[in-house]
Image (spheres, helix red, strand yellow):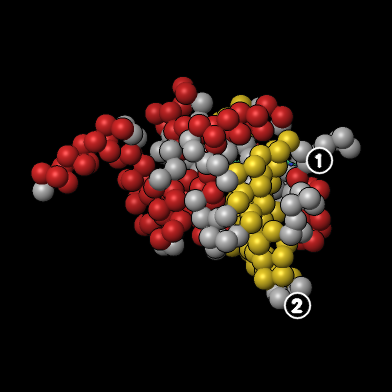
Amino acid sequence: MRHAALCSFLLFAADPYLKARLSMVQENLESRGIRDRRVLEAIRTTPRHEYVPPELRAHAYEDRPLPIGYNQTISQPYIVGLMTQLLETQPANSVLEIGTGSGYQAAVLSKLAKHVYSIEIVPELAASSAKTLLRTGCRNVTVRYGDGYKGWPEQAPFDRIILTAAPPEIPPALIDQLKPGGKLVAPEGDREQLLMAIEKSASGQISKRSVIPVIFVPMVRGTSDK
Ligand code: SAH
């Protein structure tokens, strides 16, 4: 008992947000149907407060999106949990993320995959998220500034693809860069968006199902140099 108490004292002293993070996982994810143990553990061990602006740290473990500058937001924790669970990432997987933003979703995925490649269209966010990811010890994430509509042909194909900005329709280049047997999770639509779970069969056939209505920032179109 004394040893356990000392251990939890040391853990809480090292991370003052640990308690808030563990309650968030229990109250907003587990109790709402996020059951994948690996996903829950990845979220329990990812310091969301490191990915929000310093003045918003006190709100980092509330179940809501928060502004990260440049008119962008870090997604709501429940939605991160849901999308990560739908993706069913395996340890050997190579994952492509479109919309790095703060880097938080990439950090969660980095604990579940072999490597995460993430593309961000706002250069300042690409630079700051790459720094945060390094600072928090996520070494298997590569961030690139660019236009996600084109995907990342040099690193394709991917086992898993996740979009955290909503295109009107899933970009064909991303479907092409998905491996047979691969999965893609994305919000899709203009004003009314649905979270879509897409699978590519071993023979290359695409199946698509909608999961729930969601609200994401739009996936913007880049200029030709991106
Ligand atoms: N996954 C992020 C969520 C960021 S919000 C996180 O965990 O914080 C969505 C991000 O998508 C924004 O940063 C936005 O700039 C980016 N984005 C929008 N359109 C894009 C595009 N065409 N290519 C790449 N990124 C894009």
Taking 16 as reference, is 156 above or below it?
below
Give, as a three-letter code, the residue at label 1: Arg
Q: Kindly tell me whether mark 2's CB lies below 8 Å from ligand 1.
A: no
Query: What SS does tag 2 mark?
Result: loop
The percent position of residue 21, horizontal first and vertical second, equals 36, 42
Of all residues, the one furthest to the left in this rendering is 2
Q: Which residue is mark 2?
A: 203
C-alpha span from label 1 to label 2: 31 Å
Question: Sequence-wise, which precedes: disc 1 or disc 2?
Answer: 2
Taking 21 as reference, is 205 above or below it?
below
Residue 5, quarter of picture: top left
The percent position of residue 110, horizontal first and vertical second, equals 54, 49
Give, as a three-letter code, the residue at label 2: Ser
Tag nearer the camera, 1 or 2: 2
Q: Is residue 168 visible?
A: no
The percent position of residue 220, horizontal first and vertical second, equals 77, 40
**Is 60 left or right of 195, judged from the image as shown?**
left
Between 43 and 130, the residue placed more toward the observer is 130
**Is 211 left or right of 137, judged from the image as shown?**
right
**Is 157 left or right of 127, judged from the image as shown?**
right
Q: Kindly tell me whether mark 1's CB lies below 8 Å from ligand 1.
A: yes
- Look at 54% across and 50% down and name the residue there: 109
Q: Which residue is mark 1?
A: 221
Q: Residues within 10 Å of mark 1 (few under 14, many from 20)?
A: few
